[in-house]
């Protein structure tokens, strides 16, 4: 099926998706960096990717944390400071409204910025963790922490162990329970909307195919074509903050 561009979009396209969503008993959403970029969240790639001559791939690793936890926490503190004043955009709010209307709704996100929760979404599966949570390297406890700045390095109030960001780092596996919940939602949904993701990074890259194979009607919303564009039912090119409010 041909992609549709927002500035040339037939109202029938909007109406078709609206009608499908209005009767869908189960909807699963997958979001990536694109939806947060529209709120001004830095991607930490290109010009944003260099900090004190380090790149994200050099700092977001278990090895880097073991070698220099203070350095890694200083980088995450900088990221938290940048995120603290950023607000959800209309795409985040639209998905939160959709969740209230659908009986079985799951939002799977690759983002760690917490903007979906801030925007009102509740049933969220965070594939890569959340920058506003910390995990103890001693007892394994996970807690919310919105301190900006955060004590560096922070320690667990329960056992005194060193805390780390609750983030899935390069070289680490996604938690089994997180993946299991995500795939369960993909297998049962009637409609899937893929928003602002490149369709390159696994396992998220293959999730549209998983839902499509299970019988879902799959819609892609992105600024450009992706590897998923050839398998989904509908690709709409444009900004998520403009398109999702129209669809929902």
Image (cartoon, rainbow, N blue to C red):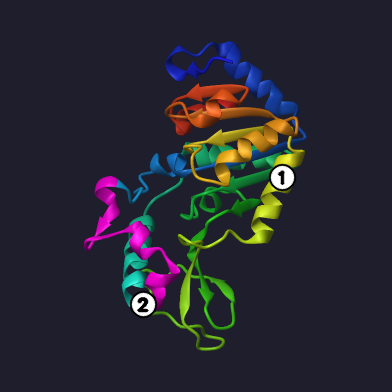
Q: Residue at x 60, y 48 (%)?
A: 121
> Could you tell me residue 64's position as x and y percent?
37, 71
**Direction bottom: furthest residue:** 160
Which of the marked residues, 2 or 1, is nearer the chain's N terminus? 2
**Direction left: furthest residue:** 53
Crowdedness near tag 1: few (<14), some (14–19) or many (≥20) residues, C-alpha within 10 Å: many
Going by the image, does 7 lie left or right of 229? left
Disc 1, SS: helix
Label 1 sits on residue = 185
> Could you tell me residue 90's position as x and y percent?
48, 37
**Quarter where residue 151 is shown:** bottom left
Residue 67 — which label? Answer: 2
**Main secondary structure type of the part rendered in magenta:** helix
Q: Is residue 56 visible?
A: yes
Q: Residue at x 46, y 54 (%)?
A: 113
Residue 133, placed above or below residue 118: below
Residue 77, placed above or below residue 243: below
Going by the image, does 138 lie left or right of 24? left
On whether residue 112 falls in the magenta region, the answer is no
**Residue segment shown in magenta:** 46-66
Cα separation, mark 2 vs mark 1, equals: 38 Å
């Amino acid at each position: 099926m041909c992609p549709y561009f927002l500035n040339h979009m037939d109202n029938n396209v909007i109406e078709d998706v609206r009608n499908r969503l209005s009767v869908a008993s189960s909807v699963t959403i997958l979001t990536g960096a694109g939806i947060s970029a529209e709120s001004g969240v830095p991607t930490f790639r290109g010009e944003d990717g260099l900090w004190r001559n380090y790149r994200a791939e050099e700092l977001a690793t278990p090895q880097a944390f073991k070698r220099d936890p203070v350095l890694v926490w200083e980088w995450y503190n900088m990221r938290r400071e940048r995120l603290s004043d950023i607000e959800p955009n209309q795409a985040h709010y639209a998905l939160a409204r959709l969740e209230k209307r659908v009986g079985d709704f799951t939002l799977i996100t690759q983002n760690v910025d917490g903007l979906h929760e801030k925007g009102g979404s509740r049933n969220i599966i965070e594939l890569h963790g959340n920058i506003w949570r910390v995990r103890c390297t001693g007892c394994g406890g996970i807690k919310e922490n919105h301190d900006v700045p955060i004590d560096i390095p922070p320690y667990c109030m329960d056992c005194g162990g060193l805390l780390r960001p609750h983030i899935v780092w390069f070289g680490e596996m996604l938690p089994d329970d997180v993946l299991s919940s995500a795939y369960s939602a993909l297998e049962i949904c009637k409609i899937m909307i893929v928003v602002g993701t490149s369709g390159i990074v696994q396992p998220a890259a293959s999730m549209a195919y998983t839902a499509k194979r299970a019988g879902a009607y799959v819609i892609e919303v992105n600024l450009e074509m992706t590897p998923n564009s050839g398998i989904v039912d509908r690709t709409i090119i444009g900004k998520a903050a403009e398109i999702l409010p129209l669809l929902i």
